[in-house]
Image: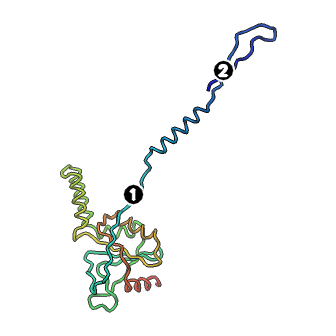
Amino acid sequence: MAEIAESGGGDEKGKKHGKKGSARIDMTPMVDLGFLLLTFFVLTSTFAKPKVMSLTYPAKEDVQPKDPPKVKNGMTFLISDDKVFYYKGQFYPAGSPDGPPTQLIETNFGPDGIRKILKENNTFVLNKITELKGKLDKKQISDSIYKKELIEAKGDKQALKVLVKTDMKAKTRNFIDVIDELYIAQIGVIAPVDITKSEQALLDEKLKQ
């Protein structure tokens, strides 16, 4: 609380003057009020929530089919020890009568690597997004219709489907980097699945080179 200290009257010659007061402010209540306000704002503030991407993992079957379904308009990424490789379409091991043996192509996690590859192979969805955004800007369609048609475009047969596979040497940050690039490239169908023995053998051979 504020206090007033009075000084004595009179001078050296004995003349009396009016008493002078000096104010001293006690800041203790202000400190208490500051802590109360700080506590209030901390408890009522909404902190930024991290943006996450939800993934739907395919259910594992007890009995594996003898002839797995062929990958149409798909691409597979193999991750191992800070390196990433990819191949397009169906995987064919050496000596397969169905097609030439699959060749792994090495790329990187940067914009000139995975992002560029996905952009070149996902033109159907990217062109559809440009078309839908144009209609949305011209108010030819509503926001709800835009989102609905975008989901349908990502799930279309012409849209690129991506499989992501990792071995025991793969690092979590590498997997996250690939998923981030898939999200940027507007890939609608993403399936993290187990790597096959044939793919692992080809990957090990590629890592030795």
Farthest front residue in view = 62
- Residues tagged 2 and 1 counted as in contact (Cβ below 8 A): no
Looking at marks 2 and 1 on the same chain, the residue that comes earlier in the sequence is marked by 2
Residue found 55% across the figure and 37% down from its top: 34
**Circle 1: residue type:** Lys
Where in the figure is residue 126, as x and y percent of width and height? 27, 63
Rendering quarter of residue 95: bottom left
Where in the figure is residue 176, as x and y percent of width and height? 42, 67
Dot 1 falls on a residue whose secondary structure is loop
The number of discs equals 2
Front of the two marks 2 and 1:
2
Q: Which of the pair 80/26 is nearer the observer?
A: 26
Where in the figure is residue 46, as x and y percent of width and height? 43, 47
Q: On the rendered structure, is 137 left or right of 178?
A: left
Q: How is the image coloured?
A: rainbow
Local crowd size for mark 1, using a 10 Å CA cut-off: few (<14), some (14–19), many (≥20): few
Where in the figure is residue 31, as x and y percent of width and height? 59, 35
Please tell me the numbered disc located at residue 51: 1
In which quadrant of the rendered image does the N terminus lie?
top right
Q: Which of the pair 2/132 is nearer the observer?
A: 2
Residue 89's place in the image compared with 22, above or below, is: below
Residue 77's place in the image compared with 16, above or below, is: below
Residue found 49% across the figure and 44% down from its top: 42
Residue that numbered label 2 is attached to? 4
Q: On the rendered structure, is 77 left or right of 16?
A: left
**Circle 2: residue type:** Ile
